[in-house]
Image (cartoon, rainbow, N blue to C red):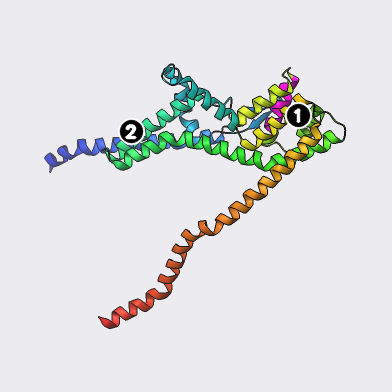
């Protein structure tokens, strides 16, 4: 009995130590994520105001490591790709919180850490581990594209109403800058208001109206907004009345919006067909299942 106890004690102590360390590590991770969730992040708007806007917790958790090792990417990634990422980050409204190099390094760290964590759990490399690591690596890019797409939807939705207000102000006798200032002050701060504020502050800092509008067009990269900006630039070059141009663009955008809504309404029956098949199948099983069971029981 004594020999058996001496043989089992080292293994028991080792397992206990491993469990304690694993519990401490899990508690530390939970505490770290909880602490991160309480830490507010802010972006600086064009007029100097701060607005609360936070990165996802998973990205924020890895960001300190990414920022520390971001210099290792110097010369390893194409400059054009980094510039495109910087433009997307700016368009998403997260400039100042993360850079293109930090985003790429965040992808690398998430892929590595997920692979290590998966290997500790599974103790071997399998298909699920590879898929999990690839998903973790792609997550920051997918998140960024989703944020940009959401801001595009907000801008697309609010652009006709913004043009209507600009038209009323300009036709009432205000110049372009005064009309923009009045609308920005009285409108709820959203993605479109932020972009208009950037244009307004850029003109105040010495850029021409054409330069500020072109920068907004390139920064947002939204077709509807690009059409409006191009029309305003041509009106500025040709000396055409801004009120007439704004009214025409507003009507065209509203027509496009109705057409887009009609297209989505026409696509709805097709999109509903696939889930309805499963609903009807489940209802059929619920209704007919007991009858079939009774029939089989009688036959048996």
In this figure, which residue is indicated by the disc labeled 2? 116
Q: Nearer the viewer, residue 154 or 174?
A: 174
Image point (65%, 33%), residue name: 226
Q: Secondary structure at mark 1?
A: helix
- Which quarter of the figure has residue 22? top left
Q: Pick whichever of labels 2 and 1 is earlier in the sequence.
A: 2
Residue 190 seen by the camera = yes
Residue 299, image x, y percentages:
27, 82
Residue 25, image x, y percentages:
38, 34
**Predominant SS along the magenta part:** helix
Residue numbers of the magenta segment: 194-204
How many angstroms separate mark 2 from mark 1 (CA)? 59 Å
212 vs 124: above or below:
above
Mark 2 nearby-residue class (10 Å; few <14, some 14–19, many ≥20): some
Is residue 44 shown left or right of residue 66?
right
Residue farthest to the bottom? 298
- Which quarter of the figure has residue 107? top left
- Image quarter of the C terminus: bottom left
Q: Is residue 131 magenta?
A: no
Q: Nearer the viewer, residue 280 or 127?
A: 280
Residue 32, image x, y percentages:
47, 33
Image point (26%, 38%), residue name: 123
Residue farthest to the right? 173
The label nearer to you, 2 versus 1, is: 1
Residue farthest to the front? 238
Mark 1 nearby-residue class (10 Å; few <14, some 14–19, many ≥20): some
> How many labels were placed on the picture?
2
Image point (69%, 22%), residue name: 211
Q: Is residue 201 magenta?
A: yes
In this figure, which residue is indicated by the disc labeled 1? 235
Q: Nearer the viewer, residue 23 or 38?
A: 38
């Amino acid at each position: 009995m004594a020999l058996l106890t001496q043989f089992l004690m080292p293994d028991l102590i080792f397992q206990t130590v491993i469990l304690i360390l694993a519990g401490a590590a899990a508690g530390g991770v939970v505490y770290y994520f909880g602490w991160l969730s309480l830490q507010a992040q802010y972006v600086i708007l064009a007029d100097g105001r701060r607005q609360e806007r936070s990165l996802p917790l998973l990205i924020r958790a890895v960001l300190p490591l990414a920022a520390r090792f971001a210099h290792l990417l110097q010369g390893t990634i194409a400059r054009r790709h980094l510039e495109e990422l910087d433009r997307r980050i700016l368009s998403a409204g997260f400039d100042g919180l993360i850079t293109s190099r930090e985003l790429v390094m965040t992808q690398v760290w998430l892929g590595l850490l997920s692979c290590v964590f998966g290997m500790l759990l599974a103790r071997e490399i399998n298909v699920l581990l590879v898929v999990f690591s690839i998903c973790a690596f792609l997550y920051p890019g997918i998140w960024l594209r989703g944020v940009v797409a959401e801001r595009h939807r907000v801008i697309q939705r609010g652009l006709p109403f913004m043009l209507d207000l600009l038209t009323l102000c300009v036709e009432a006798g205000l110049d372009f800058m005064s009309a923009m200032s009045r609308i920005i002050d009285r409108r709820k701060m959203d993605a479109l208001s932020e972009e208009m504020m950037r244009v307004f502050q850029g003109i105040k800092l010495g850029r021409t109206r054409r330069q500020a509008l072109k920068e907004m067009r390139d920064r947002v990269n939204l077709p509807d907004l690009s059409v409006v900006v191009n029309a305003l630039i041509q009106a500025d070059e040709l000396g055409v009345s801004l009120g007439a141009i704004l009214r025409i663009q507003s009507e065209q955008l509203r027509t496009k919006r109705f057409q887009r809504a009609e297209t989505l309404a026409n696509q709805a029956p097709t999109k509903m067909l696939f889930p309805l098949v499963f609903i009807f199948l489940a209802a059929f099983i619920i209704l007919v299942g007991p009858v079939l069971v009774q029939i089989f029981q009688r036959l048996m």
